Amino acid sequence: MNISRSFLVIGSLYLLVGISLGSYMGGSGDHTLAPVHAHINLLGFTLMTVFGLAYRVIPGLADGMLAKAHFWLHQIGALVLLIGLFLMMSGQVAEETIGPMFPVAELAVLLGAVLWAVNLFRTVR
Ligand code: HEM
Ligand code: HEM
């Protein structure tokens, strides 16, 4: 698997969803989902694009288990977090039902970020 390409391509899909939701909010005047929109764009597009570019330009960063584990933790964590946030903030699922999933998803993103940092410390000179 090409981690850089996967981050970049998946990030571009988040951008399409994020812009679409932003346009919908702008058009409708209903900004209820602004935090969902913000984090689709930031956690989805922006971070994934930064990761994708870094894995491409920093020699050795994409090699090994740290990069792979970071990729999957970020993908699963971000997806669960953003879908959960959307369902909760659009009123489709009660907070009590979906609430317990958030800490798990957040932990996945956080753990991914820890691996990313460890990998950087070890690889970048
Ligand atoms: C055509 C593209 C976009 C449209 C139409 C759009 C539209 C909006 C709208 C209507 C809001 C709600 C504003 C409010 O309630 O105060 C918003 C919030 C926000 N947008 Fe976008 N947006 C777009 C692209 C982006 C992109 C590309 C990013 C980041 C990379 C982004 C980041 C944010 C953030 C962080 C907020 C929350 C701001 C806050 O809570 O103060 N947006 N956007
Ligand atoms: C697991 C990851 C993250 C969690 C759990 C999280 C959680 C939150 C929460 C609870 C808020 C307050 C929302 C509100 O008051 O309505 C917030 C706001 C914000 N976060 Fe995050 N965040 C995460 C990642 C990020 C990242 C990676 C970025 C930027 C690259 C970011 C940028 C922002 C910004 C700009 C706001 C203010 C805009 C808004 O109120 O919608 N966040 N975040």
Image (cartoon, rainbow, N blue to C red):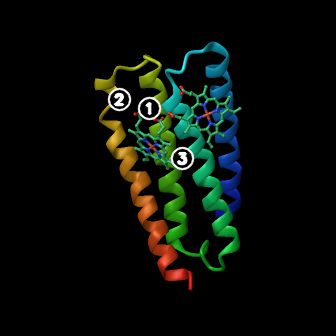
Q: Residue furthest bottom?
A: 125
Residue placed under numbered mark 3 in the picture: 43
Q: Earlier in the sequence, mark 2 or mark 1?
A: 1
Residue position marked by numbered label 2 in the rendering: 98
The numbered disc on residue 84 is 1
Determine whether 118 is above or below 13 in the image: below
Instruction: Find out if the beta carbon at label 3 lies less than 8 Å from the nearest ligand 2 atom.
Output: yes
Taking the spot 52% from the left edge, 75% from the top edge, the residue there is 120
Residue 44: image x %, image y %?
58, 45
Give percent across and percent down for residue 51: 60, 61
- Please tell me which residue lies in front, 17 or 62: 17
Tell me the residue at 40%/45% (across/down): 105
Q: Does residue 79 lie above or below 61 as drawn?
A: above
Determine the CA span between mark 2 and mark 1.
Answer: 7 Å
Is residue 1 visible to us here? Answer: no
Q: Is the residue 9 above or below the residue 62 in the image?
A: above
Q: Residue at x 44, y 31 (%)?
A: 85
For the question of whether residue 3 can be seen, the reply is yes
Q: Are marks 2 and 1 in contact (CB under 8 Å)?
A: yes
Count neighbours of disc 3 (C-alpha within 10 A) and say few if under 14, some if 14 to 19, many if 20 or more. Answer: many
Q: What amino acid is labelled 1 in the image?
A: Gly
Q: Quarter containing ligand 1?
A: top right
Which comes sooner in the sequence, label 2 or label 3? 3
The C terminus: image quadrant? bottom right
Quadrant location of the N terminus in the rendered image: bottom right
Q: Secondary structure at mark 2?
A: helix
- Which quadrant of the view contains residue 6? bottom right
Front tag of 3 and 1: 3
Q: CA distance from mark 3 to mark 1?
A: 14 Å
